[in-house]
Image (cartoon, helix red, strand yellow):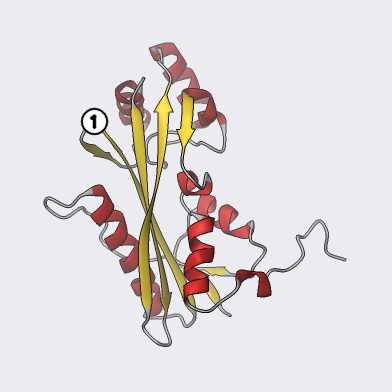
Amino acid sequence: MKLILASTSPYRRTILEKLCIPFSCAAPNIDETPLKSETADELVQRLAAEKAQSIAKSHKGLIIGSDQVAFAKGTILGKPGNKTKAIEQLKMLSTETVTFYTGLSLLDSDTGRQQTMVETFDVTFKQLSVAQINRYLDLEKPYDCAGSFKSEGLGIALFSALHGRDPNSLIGLPLIALIELLMSFDIDAFDYMQPPKHLAQ
């Protein structure tokens, strides 16, 4: 099995490495602008599928596409890009419950078969002071992360509760759902797992 992750995200790469299955990465080239009246669910499904399709034009194998947005108070939150926007996002999220939508798509470039799904994960934020927000942003600088935090890092200090079946989806790649998608393609992930590097002889 040749597995390709349609992403250059170091976060998604690190998550996929947990499965100990050899894979490569390739950068998708798509327009990620939301369509008019597109819901968060529809947006991440479309972008995850398009990312995989973009890679299929030049790569052969099983291609994983993924995309994520945060949704709170009727608004889709993307990556802030800078501290000013991150402060605005975290101020808005204080005491709120945010739903993260992660689109996941698996495409067999040889047959054209593709399946796409969405995993959700809810995060409830503590009441955050401006000083806490500034301190957090200065320490972690999560400007390339939807919602302005890294749950795998110091971002955990911002939360009062987490609700979802797979914490990996919060970081950007739901592994439970990926294993299910592979199985739907008649692929048992266990058949391709290799010993973790620290256990390999």
Element class at badge 1: loop
Q: Is residue 37 above or below residue 125?
A: below
Q: Is residue 192 visible?
A: no
Q: Could you tell me the amino acid type at mark 1? A: Lys
Q: Which residue is labeled 1 in the image?
A: 73
Residue that protrudes farthest toward the bottom in the picture: 111
On the question of residue 185 being in view, the answer is: yes
Toward the viewer: 153 or 85?
A: 153
In the picture, the quarter occupied by the C terminus is bottom right
Where's the N terminus, which quadrant?
bottom right
Residue 193: % across, % down? 69, 69
Question: Position of 43 compared to 27: left or right?
Answer: left
Quarter occupied by residue 192: bottom right
Q: Residue at x 20, y 49 (%)?
A: 39
Task: Give the tally of numbered discs.
Answer: 1
Q: Give the percent coordinates (x, y) of residue 120.
A: 38, 47
Where residue 15 sits in the image (x, y, percent)? Answer: 57, 53
- Left or right of 120? Residue 154 is right
For image coordinates 31% across by 30% down, the residue present is: 85
Where residue 35 appears, as percent x and y from the top left, is 16, 55
Residue beneath the point at 52% across and 48% down = 168
Q: Which residue in the rendered view is the most extreme toward the left?
A: 36
Residue 28, relative to residue 13: is it above or below?
below
- The image quadrant that residue 200 belongs to is bottom right
Considering only vertical position in the picture, is 54 above or below 90? below
At 36% from the left and 21% from the top, the residue drawn is 94
